[in-house]
Amino acid sequence: MIAEMTSRFSRSTVTIGVALSFSFAAICSGQNNSVYTNPRAGSDDPRVGLKAGLYDAGEASFGMQRLISLPKPAGFAPDLASIAAFDALPTPPPPPEGTPPPRGPQGGPRANYGGTNSDLAFHGTTLFVGNYSGMNFYDISNPAKIKLITSVVCPGGQGDVSVYGHLLFMSVEAANGRLDCGTQGFPTPAGAAPTPPPAADPAAADAAPGPRRPPPPPPSPDRIKGIRIFDITDVSQPKQVAEVQTCRGSHTHTLVVDPKDKDNIYVYISGSAGVRPSEELAGCSGADPDKDPDTALFTIVVIKVPLAHPERAKVVASPRIFTDPETGNMNGLWKGGNHGEGTQTTSMTRGCHDITVRSDLGLAAGACSGNGILLNISDPVHPVRIDAVTDPNYAFWHSANFSNDGTKVLFTDEWGGGGQPRCRATDPMNWGADAIFNLKNGKLTLASYYKMPAPQSELENCVAHNGSLIPIPGRDVEVQSWYQGGVSIVDFTDITHTVEIGYFDRGPVDGIKHAMGGQWSTYWYNGYIYGSEIARGVDVFKLVPNKYLTQNEIDAATQVHVAELNVQNQDKFVWPANFVTAKAYLDQLARSNALDSKRLAALNDAITKAEASNSKPKDVAQLHTLGASLEKDAGSAKTPADSYRMHALAGIMTQSGTGK
């Protein structure tokens, strides 16, 4: 989460591309090209007006069934006495007309909802949940009966986690992160004064006004800001085996696999904290790049981890991916500020919040504060920027996901920093939303916006946040978190007209005062959807059929199993060429009216006969004949999506019974 960005309503929706052949600053003009934004739901949406409560809030769902919710364990759970005392406080009077909207629970007394749950990672039958106070490991061998394996108290910021084999990586950015995971803090040496920040460090230059931050603590040799590495061979007893220090810590990180290098894993570090004093970590500088070419600003950090010796992990590069190719200026992308009258105030681009990689494509999509960028990562140590975009409707580029075929990128905007109500009926639908881009020949082009449509209350922090693809063949579908806006399932197969096809929501955590809560990350993994709820714990869902989704499509998705999942390191889904997948395609062709009813009936009948245990050679032959006809007609399908489905379905039918 970040500081709230000031904002004003905008009707313009232009996206500006940045080619490497010319200066970014030269093209920041013109805002006339409108693209589709999904409509807001009406006040009759079941998610509107749900009862508030920590563990007894009202719920609404469509296309999703909640199987189980597990509260956070001891040491991480809410302090119920504190919450009761908080709720007993008198409600403050409404502010005078014309004052800025409330900024959330930043001042005054607060209820203690325990450690904030953050990002998720998966390996085998284990779920790893990051938390500001450490991390928790869960056994999901039976997702409907998820159970805690162990808790690791280890504060240091968001605590985002990733896994690779027997290694777990954890981000550390806050000043309370100790090398030993201790909670005792850092005793101030006698007579020591807090160290002032570097005079030239612009680390908070674009942040909105907020509560005054305390001065940074004195340097300590016991502090870590960077990455912790744990050996999780025994998930019940994780052991920290390495730590890699960086100048700005790690707000988030991304594991990068080099297909040409089987001996190492790489970690891209996205740090957003102020630069540490050189007295704490030698070589750290927060100076303007004009004064110090080795500044820790305007870069990401690349760590190389030898898999056989993770204790030898080290920083190997700090690529200047924001540099202007003409001038060589490291601060070469968005400088911060608004895009003209009536537009968003957007953060300066001096680092990335999240980077999502597709190693199989040699590409990465970076959500980098003021820009969405595209990187060539064929050499993971030296990524090269090949495109960048900005948007007058975006305040803070937060995260990204590729479509399965790599032709689309969905970026999110964390307008308000995650702590603010940004899904109210008065909030623009293209602010704090997803922006979905076509990706072709290394260039990004804006196609549409999507925002969770149900209006939320002033008490609910809500904005676009973390999600992942659901492996439904023939469709681009993402399940996504919206903090206290709940979970939304969006279909962006038709990139110009995105549509919600499912959801889950609860009422506010607190019905009187603003309190932090809601879904931080919601990811699909091996047939189920897992949610990291900030205040309440962990949720497990399954998909159920509705008018937008059939059981055949759900069955086809559940065929896709992976050994582990780190959403920022996307793998390509591959479906088995079987009748389960075939029936999903057939349902989609029926939904889109791509085939007439007579032909649909013939295809269904042929598949049913061919998959029967007593099928005859003539049944298989009929299947092949219909498949060949389908292949012939695929080129004249009404849409590219239907053409793909017809090709894929024909391929399954014509290969059936051939042993191929």
Image: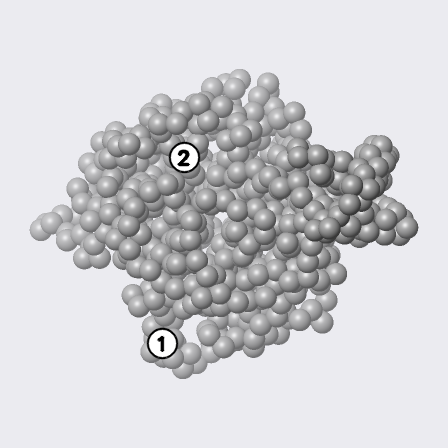
Q: 226 or 370: which is nearer to us?
A: 226
Q: Is residue 285 visible?
A: no
* Disc 1 element: helix
Disc 2 marks a residue whose amino acid type is: Tyr
Q: Earlier in the sequence, mark 1 or mark 2?
A: 1
Marker disc for residue 268:
2
Please count the marks in the image.
2
How far across and down, in percent of the image, does residue 102 sit?
A: 51, 64
Camera-side residue: 349 or 97?
349
Corner quadrant of residue 280 = top left
Visible in this render: residue 365? yes
Badge 2: few (under 14), some or many (20 or more) residues near its Cα, within 10 Å? many
Q: Which residue is at 38% across, 40% downward?
A: 164
Q: Nearer the viewer, residue 15 or 649?
A: 649
Q: Quadrant of the C terminus?
A: top right
* Kind of residue at badge 1: Leu
Circle 2 — which element? strand
Indicate whether 43 appears above or below 402.
below
Asked where in the image residue 642 lies, by quadrant, the reply is top right
Residue highlighted by disc 1 = 80
* Residue at 73% from the left image edge and 50% from the top image edge: 614
Rendering coords of residue 162 (x, y %): 40, 44
Residue displayed at 31% across by 30% down: 306
Q: Is residue 648 left or right of residue 420?
A: right
Q: Position of residue 371 (x, y in %)?
A: 55, 36
